[in-house]
Amino acid sequence: MGKRMVVIGGVAGGASAAAKAKRENPELEVVVYEKSGFVSYGACGLPYVLSGEIPGLEKLLARTPEEFRRQGIAVHTRHEVVDVDPDLRVLTVFDHGEGRTFQDRYDYLVLATGAKPLIPPIPGTEQEGVYTLRSMEDGERLLKALPGARRAAILGAGYIGLEVAEAFRKRGLEVTLLEAKDRPLPHWDTEVGDLLREELERHGVEVWTGVRVEALRGTGRVEAVETSEGVVPADLVLLATGIRPNTGLAQAMGVALGPTGAIATDEGMRTNLEGVYAAGDVAESFHRVLKRPYWLPLGDVANKHGRTAGSNIAGQEARFAGVVGTAIFKAFGLAVATTGLSLEAAQREGFRARKVFIQSRDGAHYYPGSQPLWVELVYEEGTERLLGGAVVAHGHGALRINALAALLHREGTLEDLLGLDLAYAPPYSPVWDPLLIAAQQAR
Ligand code: FAD
Ligand code: NAD
């Protein structure tokens, strides 16, 4: 008889694990339990459905439960795993559709329960008109609310706040972005935050930074946000104040968490419990610059985690190589890409770090339509080892970040960067690539 693999959570981490394991070992029985009504979708596309650029949430679905079934994978939506006994390898499942509880067994278990929004501890967040954006259901609720909304306040100028500010403006809303720290994208250095602020304001977003949000005012339906700097009227409030790993079930069954508060795994995505794996936003990764566990809750990482866990369960030997912390997002006309450590983060970590920040272009200066592009490089004094960087551009030029990410992956130095044979043609780059200009300046 084939072994039985059960996956808890059916989005990026869980769906990848299930699909990979079944493909590599068709003998495996593979079952996925998903609490919500949706599996296997690209949450990363949600802001673009809200903006109207993608015509409908269904476009985000990668695979339906029916398509999984055709591959021999049993997917149960609206099924929540409420308990796991790792000694007996038995799970208790609540079927929200039928309102009944039943038990199932596993030989291999994948915890892919993801992350959930952090709700700030302020009065008024339970009112109507207050939203988070994490799941397809969240997307449905917001899509329904948008036509009746006029003034939106977004709490948090991180990834979601910045992407959704653009979406809301495209839907004609007045938007105020309220960030507790002193700049947009505060986990990165100031120059990038300044570029973002300018871009947001140019597109009519009011940006309030360094504000303490005290309460959401309203009598059952939100009407305004009370802050240390004044009151912002709003009929729609989005809480985009961060997320945390959804580890409740893991902790209850005795799965060890790491120093970040997410599940600790080895390179094969195995947890401390025999036969139990973790994948996606619920799990940590190894950070190759910091050389310690790190929580990087991103979609591409979740897919790699899932694929690694699935391969190992199928009997192959797969290892996840870790992360360097690369991310990219769009804010109106700007693409903002970062990798590794900002200067502030590097110094906080005890590196003797320095940075350069340069402005160049995304094409030859004489090429029609070429636009400004900015590069930040963070490196260690003395060794000249690269520690991080950012590229901000008006489009795909920001993907230069990937060259930097590759160097960080292998502990590259400024000299390694200067030696790279990078692509050049006038429509795409100046003859000296902006990364090389930054490296020369650092030298
Ligand atoms: P989740 O997507 O959180 O899925 C976990 C699933 O587990 C949930 O559906 C949940 O219902 C289910 N579950 C939890 N507990 C149980 C239980 N007990 N029983 C059954 N089911 C359970 N990443 C990028 O790399 N690039 C981007 O551009 C990007 N954009 C994003 C934009 C938005 C608006 C959002 C919200 C996220 C974005 N991300 C992006 C992050 C990316 O979407 C996540 O990293 C990814 O979804 C993580 O997948 P996951 O499977 O680990 O977790
Ligand atoms: P985030 O951690 O990126 O940003 C949260 C922001 O909220 C921070 O700037 C923080 O200072 C601020 N904040 C916290 N409490 C506040 C308060 N009470 N008032 C005002 N500001 C407050 O988190 P997010 O934007 O919620 O996004 C969640 C996750 O989704 C990200 O960590 C990322 O993994 C993922 N994501 C990625 C992308 C991408 O890669 N393009 C896009 C969207 C989402």
Image (cartoon, rainbow, N blue to C red):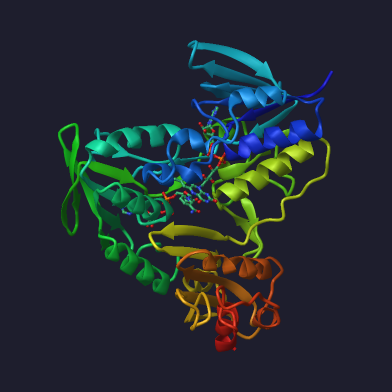
Residue closest to the far front: 368
Report the residue at 59% width, 84% height from top: 432
The x and y percentages for residue 430 are 56, 81
Nearer to the camera, 299 or 50: 50
Left or right position of 396 against 232:
right
Vertical side of 42 occupied by 37: above or below: above
The x and y percentages for residue 79 are 54, 21
Report the residue at 70% width, 78% height from top: 420
**In the rendered image, is residue 294 in sight?**
yes
Vertical side of 310 occupied by 352: above or below: below
| Quadrant, the C terminus | bottom right
Q: Where on the picture, by quarter, is residue 386?
A: bottom right
Q: Where on the picture, by quarter, is residue 85?
A: top right
Left or right position of 237 against 371:
left
Left or right position of 190 against 215:
right
The x and y percentages for residue 229 are 18, 59
